Image (cartoon, rainbow, N blue to C red):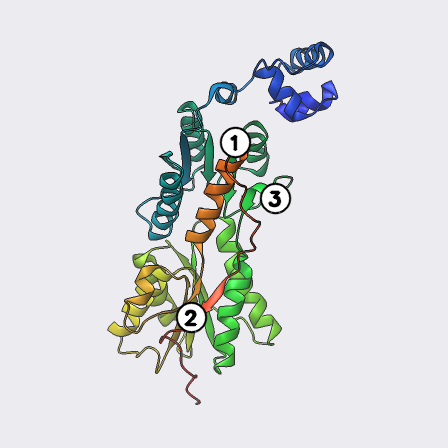
């Protein structure tokens, strides 16, 4: 199916010019308009009705697409966007994607039909090409937790690899050599990057990847429980675990407690995200801080500034994962 980029290339004009022709802007030369219309006819290009709606979109709403609002991570993201919306007297509309391409697409399209002038989109299932097309047609869209080539200035992300590398390296520095990884069974980039960071740290310190030391389950409390049960079934010499997120870490700690394995005296564990639950576990969880509140705040202000010249574009910020030391890690017990 031809895209707006294909039309622009054939007409030898910019994507922005094609967009202006589609939206019947007056600031387009007759020559450019004819070239675009001819290219559309040759390619049998069908304009996206949602994209055309942008010509009359409202600037009073800001849309946000997340995976699941019941997940604490996304609840914090939505809350941060809502704070920005309130600050600028905007209304927030929410779409849910559930890590499924069709649902993410439907959520975005619905928000476009609702005349959202700005959008913060968390999408893991849609392809880069499809998101590039959305971004090229919708100047107020910002992608969070992912980088799309050609639109890096409208993407807000964090280095997941660095986060799990830091977590694994800290455990190694505490003398742990038998370290496992509890991962998510969702086939998304975050999981691939976090597992890669763990593996890179082991390799950098010349430690082997133990047999059956990497397990994947749902990224929730129950998934963490099942993953820890699997690890204890497969391995008798593990002393530490790096978890995909804090919720899985909490599930793992529950299983360790049930098996009379004391954390951190006998077993150390590190989470990821620094969700509120990390501060209320016993022991309090050492974790990697994912500043999703700050990132969402920045993304929302960026999205608003792209369509409203009265809003100052926020200064570009580099977001980095940081280690939050609490009480779930101790030195490995020497045999």
Q: Which numbered marker is on residue 152? A: 3
Whether residue 122 appears in this view of the structure is no
Quadrant showing the N terminus: top right
* Left-right relation of 12 to 94: right
Q: Which residue is mark 2?
A: 241
Quadrant of res 248: bottom left
Mark 3 vs mark 2, foreground winner is: 3
Secondary structure of residue under mark 1? helix
Quadrant of res 107: top left
Q: Outermost residue toward the front? A: 310
* Left-right relation of 58 to 3: left
Disc 3 and disc 2: Cα gap in Å? Answer: 33 Å
Disc 2 and disc 1: Cα gap in Å? Answer: 45 Å
How many neighbours does mark 1 have within 10 angstroms: few (below 14), some (14-19), or many (20 or more)?
some
Mark 3 vs mark 1, foreground winner is: 1
In the image shown, does 181 or 22 lie closer to the viewer? 22
In the rendered view, would you say 284 is above or below 187?
below
How many neighbours does mark 3 have within 10 angstroms: few (below 14), some (14-19), or many (20 or more)?
few
Quadrant showing the C terminus: bottom left
Q: Residue at x 43, y 84 (%)?
A: 331
* Left-right relation of 15 to 54: right
Q: Which numbered marker is on residue 307? A: 1
In terms of sequence position, does the residue under pointer 3 or pointer 2 come before the other? 3
Tag 2 and tag 1, C-beta contact below 8 Å = no
In terms of sequence position, does the residue under pointer 3 or pointer 1 come before the other? 3
Secondary structure of residue under mark 3? helix
In the image shown, does 241 or 289 lie closer to the viewer? 289
The image shows residue 71 at horizontal and vertical percentages of 33, 50
The image shows residue 36 at horizontal and vertical percentages of 68, 15
In terms of sequence position, does the residue under pointer 2 or pointer 1 come before the other? 2
Quadrant of res 40: top right
């Amino acid at each position: 199916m031809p895209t707006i980029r294909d039309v622009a290339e054939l007409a030898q004009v910019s994507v922005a010019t094609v967009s202006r022709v589609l939206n019947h802007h007056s600031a387009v030369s007759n020559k450019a308009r004819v070239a675009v219309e001819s290219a559309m006819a040759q390619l049998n290009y069908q304009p996206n009705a949602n994209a055309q709606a942008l010509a009359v979109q409202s600037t009073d709403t800001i849309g946000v697409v997340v995976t699941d609002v019941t997940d604490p991570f996304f609840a914090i993201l939505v809350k941060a966007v809502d704070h920005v919306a309130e600050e600028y007297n905007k209304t927030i509309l929410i779409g849910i994607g559930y890590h499924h391409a069709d649902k993410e697409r439907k959520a975005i399209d619905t928000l476009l039909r609702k005349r959202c002038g700005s959008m913060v989109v968390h999408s893991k299932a849609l392809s880069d090409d499809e998101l590039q097309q959305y971004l090229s047609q919708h100047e107020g869209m910002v992608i969070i937790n992912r980088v799309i080539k050609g639109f890096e200035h409208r993407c807000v992300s964090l280095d997941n690899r660095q986060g799990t590398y830091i977590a694994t390296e800290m455990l190694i520095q505490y003398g742990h050599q038998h370290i496992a990884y509890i991962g998510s069974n969702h086939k998304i980039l975050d999981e691939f990057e976090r597992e890669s960071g763990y593996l890179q740290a082991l390799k950098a310190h010349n430690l082997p990847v133990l047999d059956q030391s990497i397990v994947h389950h749902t990224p929730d409390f129950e998934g963490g429980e099942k993953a820890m049960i699997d690890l204890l079934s497969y391995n008798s010499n593990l002393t530490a675990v790096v978890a995909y997120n804090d919720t899985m870490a909490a599930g793992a700690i529950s299983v360790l407690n049930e098996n009379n394995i004391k954390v951190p005296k006998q077993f150390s564990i590190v989470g990821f995200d620094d969700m509120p639950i990390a501060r209320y576990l016993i022991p309090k969880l050492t974790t990697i801080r994912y500043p999703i509140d700050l990132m969402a705040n920045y993304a929302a202000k960026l999205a608003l500034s792209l369509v409203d010249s009265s809003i100052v574009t926020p200064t570009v910020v580099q977001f980095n994962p940081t280690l939050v030391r609490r009480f779930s890690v101790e030195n490995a017990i020497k045999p």
